[in-house]
Image: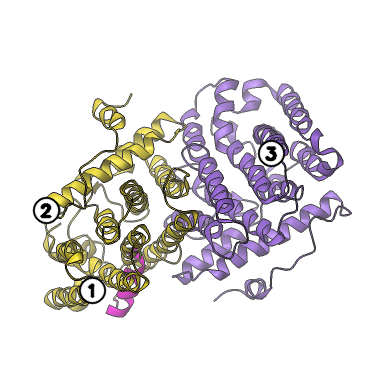
Chain colours: A purple, B yellow
């Protein structure tokens, strides 16, 4: 049986206050995106005729386990630059988040990072078992492409295929999965900043960049030059995200972080802090952020929300 | 470094004798499809800018590990009923086979079926390690959707989205993944034929049916009534495939089968043979085959190859 809480969410239609409202402060806006994405994720599973009750429950556990929702925020902040259809942006946000969630479930497995805690809750293989964790990951992975290929998604067929193609390139063997293989290969070895840069670009950067680029596909009125600026911004914001993650792994505590802190040191994994030192890593992150924001000059004040989000990505404490 | 054999394949252009040649006998035709699919699979990886050499090698190991290639055969035999573009059919065949291969890699993991042998070769987690096996599965899964969304695939955008949607529905939580969860839940329990039927329909039947339905999307000149006949045929051939697998698990030996025989009994997994008995399971398979072939009457002799393939699926010894 589904819990009452989930039944409530499942029956709730996707109707939230408009995110494009510029009067919301950053925190209100971020909370709004988190709620919208939570609803869209649950609705996506609700629309799916899941063939096993255990699988359905475990998928719901996975998508309701929190998370910062940085990728959906990037999709929204970028798409708001160019008159998007709100339902489309919510669906696209949910689909990229599904890929992120599946990757965390597989990364946390005992044969990989072996982590018991994620967003302050038991990881899926701890809550259920390893086999279920592998299969829930596979199911969510597939569901992302299902969501982007459906007839009910109100963008053109060519836009759907662009969204699918951006996501496959960022999340497969040209991106995230390759980054994870490189990461596992670095355990117990010394590494240079340039090797780390390549690994992080694939492991985390590719999907963060994809979020901004998918937002640009949803932003129907963006001009080609503006799309190019977003693509440049996307590439750099992807790089800075992981540098900040490494700083947090070294500085924050497990409670604030919602996942095990100091893990890289414990697991003998090189990261930007061990390669560069703490202060140089912080300076590097700040310089990258400035470089990223410079690409948004073309939008003037229209990009205020995106600039706020870039600042949050660098200054966050979790 | 890639081995010489792989370098040869990678440089080889995709040019094989036409499969639509009705003068080939069944064995020649099947060998032709196997070679074409092998080439298309290797080319798909070759076209991909895989971010890690270890990942690339492991992906090549996975796609060159043999297999019957029943799904590509169904795609070809159905699409040949309606003037397909040969390059399209090869790509579509490779993409559905990628999903099948990824699912076997994950199913063979120690936390699931824990099998060391597949198609007579070491399974991926034995040859490499568990983490690599999970990630290679994820990479191949993603690559399938990448292949179907690429601009170079010469079908309309709407056909590409149909192909993607048939594949997501058959392979995710509405199909194959749900079937695997149900299958794991049956271990050590007695089951009825109707419960088994549901599980098998999802676990194996859905992807076999999808192969025939994806072939129908490639068959450009098929009429709507003919598509409906293929869809009915597809649904039944998916069911019969697993009944025959269960009979083989009980009757064949490991060498002929290329995977561990008698596994269901050893693992206390109920199957059609344990639920119905050997002879009734054989009779059931034969009746289903007749029912499936009946739906092909509308094509008269044009469906000869597809009928030969349906006979092979039921009479095969491996």
User: Which residue carries the number 1 mark?
Assistant: B292
Q: Name which of mark 2 and mark 1 comes first in the sequence.
A: 2
> Residue A273: which quarter of the image?
top right
Instruction: Please give left or right for residue B81 compared with residue A277 in the image.
Output: left
Instruction: Please give left or right for residue A109 compared with residue B257 in the image.
Output: right
Q: Is residue A6 above or below residue A204?
A: below
Describe the element under mark 2 as helix, strand or loop.
loop
User: Which residue carries the number 3 mark?
Assistant: A224
* Cα gap from disc 1 to disc 3, whole angstroms: 52 Å
> Residue A32: which quarter of the image?
bottom right
Quarter containing the C terminus of chain A:
top right
Name the spot of residue A185 as percent of width and height, x first. 46, 30
Dominant secondary structure (helix, strand or loop) of the stretch shown in magenta: helix
Q: Chain of mark 3?
A: A
Q: Which mark is residue A107?
A: none
Is residue A258 in sight in this rendering?
Answer: no
């Amino acid at each position: 049986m589904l819990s009452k809480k989930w039944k409530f969410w499942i029956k709730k239609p996707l109707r939230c206050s408009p995110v494009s409202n510029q009067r919301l402060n950053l925190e209100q806006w971020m909370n709004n995106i988190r709620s919208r994405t939570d609803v869209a994720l649950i609705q996506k599973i609700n629309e799916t005729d899941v063939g096993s009750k255990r699988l359905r429950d475990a998928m719901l556990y996975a998508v309701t386990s929190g998370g910062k929702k940085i990728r959906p925020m990037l999709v929204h902040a970028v798409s708001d630059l160019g008159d998007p259809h709100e339902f489309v942006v919510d669906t696209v946000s949910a689909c990229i988040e599904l890929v992120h969630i599946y990757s965390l479930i597989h990364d946390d497995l005992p044969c990989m990072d072996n982590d018991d805690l994620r967003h302050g809750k038991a990881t899926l293989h701890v809550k259920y078992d390893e086999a279920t964790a592998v299969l829930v990951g596979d199911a969510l992975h597939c569901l992302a492409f299902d969501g982007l290929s459906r007839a009910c998604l109100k963008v053109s067929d060519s836009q759907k295929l662009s969204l699918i193609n951006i996501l496959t390139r960022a999340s497969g063997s040209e991106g995230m999965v390759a980054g994870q293989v490189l990461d596992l290969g670095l355990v117990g070895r010394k590494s240079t900043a340039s090797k780390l840069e390549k690994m992080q670009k694939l492991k985390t950067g590719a999907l963060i960049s994809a979020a901004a680029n998918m937002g640009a596909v949803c932003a129907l009125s963006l001009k080609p030059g503006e799309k190019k600026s977003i693509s440049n911004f996307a590439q750099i914001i992807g790089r800075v995200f992981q540098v900040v993650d490494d700083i947090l792994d070294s500085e924050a505590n497990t409670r604030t972080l919602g996942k095990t802190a100091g893990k890289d040191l414990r697991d003998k994994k090189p990261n930007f802090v061990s390669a560069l030192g703490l202060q140089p890593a912080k300076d590097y992150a700040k310089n990258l952020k400035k470089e990223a924001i410079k690409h948004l000059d073309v939008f003037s004040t229209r990009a205020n929300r995106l600039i706020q989000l870039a600042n949050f990505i660098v200054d966050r404490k979790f």
